[in-house]
Amino acid sequence: MRWFVASLVTVFGFISQASVANPQSAVFSSDFESNNQHFNILSGCQISREVARLGQGGLLCERGNASLISRYPVSELGLLELWVKPLSNQTSYRINILTSASVRVDSQWQQVGLIENAAGATDYLAHRISIDDPGRKFIRIDIESINGQLALDDFVLDRILLDTALQKNEQKIISGILDQLKTNKNYDVQAESFRALGKNYAAQLESQRQYLEYANAIYSSITFVLASSERNKMSNPMAYASFRTILADAKRVASPLQQARLNSMVKPFGDLVTATLTVVSAGTYAAFAEPFKSFLASTFDRSNYENADLNRKDRKFAEENGLKVYEKAETFLSELEKELQQVSTLDAELQLMLRNVEVFRKDLDKHLRDYLQHGGMARTQENYSKVMSKEESNRQQIAEQVSNHVTNKAQGYLASENTTELVQYMLKTSEQLDGMQEFKERFNQITASAITFYDRFERSIAPEQNPFTDPKDKAAWEQHAKKARTYIQQSKEGFSKAYM
């Protein structure tokens, strides 16, 4: 089981402005507590203590259709974050986000976002979607729950990000240029618009560079690695006194050949004494558990210990304790399996996120190279390195070159009265600018998966999740859990700082 990619193990080295819901910049929030009701429930839902993600209240929505509407118009619509929990693994859902300047009966509602999720897990799942509307609007949430009830909680709406505002400005500039071409082809009238377009086009290079850095470092916190290490130890049988006692009891009555076999069976788990606990995967456990129980049964069988070269005390121990040792092993392994299921589920989620991050990084890398080429820069490693440079002077240099190229190219088409080429160039420029929106939404999904993972990780190491009954085993689990809680909290805080 791999909890991280080795090449990503570096410390966070930057504070970014990526899209992660931040209570300090929120313009709207609703957690369905008694003192924080910002939605009117139109139909299909009710506030319930039973489904709260945090705090005392959540929103329980019945199977079928339901609707909510904000009580007041929201002044600025940026990044929306909400948490959704299907109450059955058969439940899928669709959530439409709509906005309108009015709530009159004849108001026109515009769809600005759609969340869809297939049936499967029944934990709370974070969703993020960018609305990016500077107008003062009401928000309506239409919910369709299929094959079961749905819980919602913790709505947060952030301000529009700076790079989004820049993109909106770019779209206005291009629209203005095209409109002016219809009525006025004067060079001086258009010159300032071309200069503004060039500067804004170049400014988006910085946004793309930052998103690439986010992708490269999203799981790079050392504290996250330490938390994962502690979490892995909690699924290793060698970490628990019960298992070590069972091994000692089995070796006491086993023949030298059986002892050698037993050592071979537990070797994949490492050695607690030398602090080399190995990460336990579901495959390792499955290959061990049943053969180990069979080994115990045969080792404590009367025909085995009566014919073995044992002293009277050990033979008596085998006769009196064989069944107890086997039952103790069965109980312990059953408890350990519950722990391993938690770890395996988290690992599968993390591996999926890592794959999504890698695909995102590769796709954005290609987009950046295409973007540079449209900005007049050859697709060379030197130009790419300047954009990604840690030296601000290098980034400013290539940004100025791109800005000047975009401005001069557009001005050249206008000066030559080649309207067709100018329009085509403006459309291609607009296409390059709009292309970044896809990556913003994909990054929203990545960060949503990350905070969902943090939430599930924290819940999996809560004291009430301790699966063991033996006091020493419970204490060992809690000892690792305490360290994991400290590390994951530090990692979570680092993630929040890095992506706000």
Image (tube, rainbow, N blue to C red):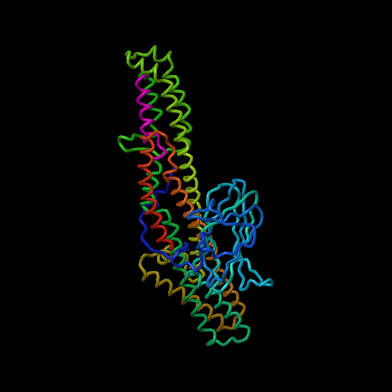
Residue 415 in which image quadrant? bottom right
In x, y percent, where is residue 474? Answer: 39, 37
In x, y percent, where is residue 3? Answer: 43, 46
User: Looking at this view, is 401 or 132 the one in front?
Assistant: 132
In x, y percent, where is residue 198? Answer: 49, 76
User: Looking at this view, is 473 or 386 the one in front?
Assistant: 473
In x, y percent, where is residue 144? Answer: 64, 56
Mainly helix, strand or loop, the magenta region? helix
Residue most toward the top?
A: 307
Residue at 58% x, 54% y is 60
Residue most toward the left?
A: 274
Is residue 238 highlighted in magenta?
yes
Residue at 47% x, 49% y is 456
Residue 99 in which image quadrant? bottom right
User: Looking at this view, is 407 or 360 the one in front?
Assistant: 360
Residue most toward the front?
A: 34
Q: Quadrant of the C terminus?
A: bottom left
Residue 88 in the image: above or below residue 385: above
Residue 227 in the image: above or below residue 17: above
Q: Is residue 44 left or right of residue 7?
A: right
Q: Magenta stretch?
A: 233-253
Q: Quadrant of the N terminus?
A: top left
Q: Is residue 84 left or right of residue 219?
A: right
Is residue 51 highlighted in magenta?
no
